[in-house]
Amino acid sequence: MPDTSPRAHDALEITAPHRELLDQVLDKWSLDVLAVLCEGPSRFNGLRRAIPAVTQKSLTATLRRLERNGIVEREVVATRPVAVEYRITPLGKSMRAPVDALLDWIREHTPAVERARDRFDGAGG
């Protein structure tokens, strides 16, 4: 039987800083905001229209968290009235490949997950 124990360098280690950052950049609305901003800069109301289920309060909090973590930047646009435009940063763009990999995994494995849920729920889990 092959050895399936993880080697020391393969161990999955999730520390408190890892968990905090994951919670802040992969929360309920962050991926939606990043998906919109990956297509190009957007003003607040443009984001609200693109993500109709998000409340103003939640969108504001999400943008602030993403900005604090260097994933999104805001720029005051000298128009009348003054506007704020949000764009993804190079650091934020670097998240695209791992997020795409996770979404690919989800697409590939969702049927198996749904079957497991059905088995669990059917067994009175």
Image (tube, rainbow, N blue to C red):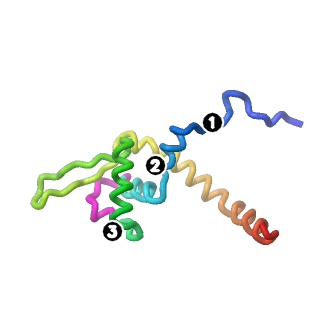
Q: Residue at (41%, 70%) from the top-left corner?
A: 53
Task: Measuring from the top left, give residue 54's x and y in whole percent.
Answer: 39, 66
Residue 13's label in the rendered image is 1
Q: Quadrant of residue 79?
A: bottom left
Question: In which quadrant is the C terminus drawn?
Answer: bottom right
Task: Measuring from the top left, give residue 90's x and y in whole percent.
Answer: 36, 40
Seen in the picture, residue 83 relative to 19 is either above or below; the reply is below
| Mark 3 lies on residue | 49
Seen in the picture, residue 95 relative to 29 is either above or below; the reply is above
The span from disc 2 to disc 3 (Cα, nearest Å) is 22 Å
Q: Earlier in the sequence, mark 1 or mark 2?
A: 1
Q: Earlier in the sequence, mark 3 or mark 1?
A: 1
The span from disc 1 to disc 2 (Cα, nearest Å) is 18 Å
Which SS class for mark 3? helix
Seen in the picture, residue 14 relative to 44 is either above or below; the reply is above
Query: Is residue 43 shown in magenta?
Result: yes
Residue 106's label in the rendered image is none
Task: Give the residues drawn in magenta, as a range.
Answer: 38-47
Q: Amino acid at mark 1?
A: Glu
Single out the mark in the foreground, 2 or 3.
Answer: 2
Task: Measuring from the top left, give residue 96's x and y in whole percent.
Answer: 46, 47
